[in-house]
Amino acid sequence: MDFDKLIMHRYSVRKFKDLPVEQEKLDLLLEAARNAPTAANRQPQRLFLVTRPEGLEKIDRCTPCRFGAPGVFLICYDRAQCWVRPFDGQDSGLVDASIVTTHIMYQAADLGLGTTWVMHFDPAATVKEFSLPETIVPAAMLIFGYPAADAAPADRHYQRHPREKILCRTL
């Protein structure tokens, strides 16, 4: 699919088929994450691929937003590996994790998989459920799988602000 069509038609899937995703597709998703750019190429992303029933039960204890998906990428970053902006000490972790999540999301769409980027999760519960080390910070969950036949975009999906509202100024 052409990229412009992909970004126009990709939507957050909230209903999935009960089918596992093939290993070769999982490998392509992981490769997309591995190739995502990060600040100073520090690559602080740490991913947990959750597909087993016991792992999915842990996810369900951290968020109500799995929507029956057969797989979840728990996308984290290692704060000890992040680049730090010298002016204010802000680390790159959340930005790096977001770029990685976006790469996986668009690769999934290109492979015919549906995704939903989940921010509605309890970080403390996630750290506890997955026994994450103290430097590992959960940033997002990307649920994925094959969309159900009746899956559809939310009503507000195609509502977009005009360019004039998002472009503050041309300098």
Image (cartoon, rainbow, N blue to C red):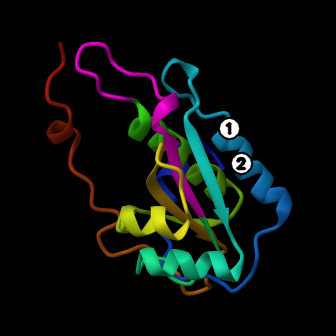
| Residue under label 2 | 30
- In the rendered structure, find residue 34 and report the number of the disc placed on it: 1
In-image side of 119 versus 107 (left or right): left
Helix or strand or loop: what does disc 1 sit on?
Answer: helix
Label 2 is placed on what type of residue?
Answer: Leu
Residue 69 showing in the rendered view: no
Q: Which quadrant: the C terminus? A: top left
Q: Quadrant of residue 123?
A: bottom left
Question: Front-most of 114 and 93?
Answer: 93
Label 1 is placed on what type of residue?
Answer: Arg
Graded by Cα atoms within 10 Å as few (under 14), some (14 to 19) or many (20 or more), the crowding at tag 2 reads: some
Q: Are marks 1 and 2 in contact (CB under 8 Å)?
A: yes
In-image side of 24 versus 69 (left or right): right
Q: Name the spot of residue 83 as percent of width and height, x first.
A: 45, 22
Helix or strand or loop: what does disc 2 sit on?
Answer: helix
> Range of the magenta residues?
73-91
Label 1 to label 2: alpha-carbon separation: 6 Å
Q: Name the spot of residue 119 as percent of width and height, x first.
A: 37, 61
Is 165 situated above or below 22? above
Q: Residue at x 45, y 54 (%)?
A: 138
Q: Residue at x 23, y 20 (%)?
A: 88
Is residue 116 rendered magenta in the image?
no
Q: Name the spot of residue 46 as percent of width and height, x first.
A: 59, 45
In-image side of 29 versus 41 (left or right): right
Is 147 situated above or below 39? below
Is residue 74 rendered magenta in the image?
yes
Graded by Cα atoms within 10 Å as few (under 14), some (14 to 19) or many (20 or more), the crowding at tag 1 reads: some
Q: Name the spot of residue 77 as percent of width and height, x first.
A: 50, 42
Q: Quadrant of residue 169?
A: top left
